[in-house]
Image: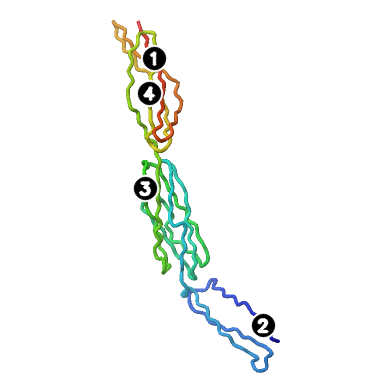
Amino acid sequence: PNDSTSATITFDATDLPEGNYTGNIDLDSNDPSTPQIDISVTLNVGTGGTAEILQTPSSITETLESGGSKVDTIKVKNIGTAMLTVAFSEAASWLSIPTGPFDIAPGDSALTEVILDASGLLGGSYSDSIITATNAPANPTIILPVSLNVLAANIDVPSDSIAETLIEGTQTIADLIIRNTGNAALNLNLDAQESPAIMSATKAQEFTTYSKSMNTVSLSPTNEKGEIPIILNVWLFI
């Protein structure tokens, strides 16, 4: 007496087509005045409820060196009570995402990868947007801004020639100045080449050889200057 209890009612719409379904629950007891209670039950499948979207992040910003790439992730959650359908679109060549459409059940989430690719891009700032089209009445379209800052090296060689005057059997050292005026590391592979001898049948000519053991050189950004010593030798051929 003076107590209460509760019963859990489970609704299962698995494999049911859209539509309205009705039924009843018969409650029998030993109450003399009300030995039986009929409780009506109605289930609406597919045609009821509303899809509602929660998408994160609200924007994407990345910094890459030219030629690099990065994968980001967009998370979409259905916080509504009906099936959520989403589709993605973008326009920039450096931005890619699976277009869909994708269906997300109420309470579920989906992760979608976004690839930012700086291959072939010059240094600078780039921007585009990912458009999410949905069947959620409150958010039929979501615009997600994407920003990409591309770092690139920029070589600056103040002088493209080296000239020296020497007598036979002497040598000197000249500096080849190379600057990196970009905002990414500048990698250099230097190869010293000898100039060909100038010869004739009656007279020998002087010629200059350039010799230097040159390995790969890397210059950091922000106008770093590298000086490459080059040994110049003069030989006389008779």
Hey, what amino acid is under mark 3? Tyr
Give the mark nearest the N terminus, 3 or 4: 3
Closer mark to the observer between disc 1 and disc 3 = 1
Image location (x, y in percent) of residue 137: 41, 69
Q: Earlier in the sequence, mark 4 or mark 2?
A: 2
User: Callout 4: 10 Å neighbours few (<14), some, many (20+)?
Assistant: some
- Residue reaching furthest to the right: 1
User: Residue 166's quadrant in the figure?
Assistant: top left
- Image position of 91 with respect to 8: above or below: above
For marks 1 and 3, give the CA distance: 48 Å
In-front residue for pair 147/100: 147
Q: Please give the name of the residue rendered at 66% of the width and 81% of the height, measured from the top-left corner.
A: 5
Residue located beneath label 2 in the image: 4
Residue at image mark 1:
172
- The amino acid pointed to by label 1 is Thr
Q: Callout 1 environment at 10 Å: few (<14), some (14 to 19), or many (20+)?
A: few
Q: Which residue is mark 3?
A: 126
Report whether 5 appears left or right of 196.
right
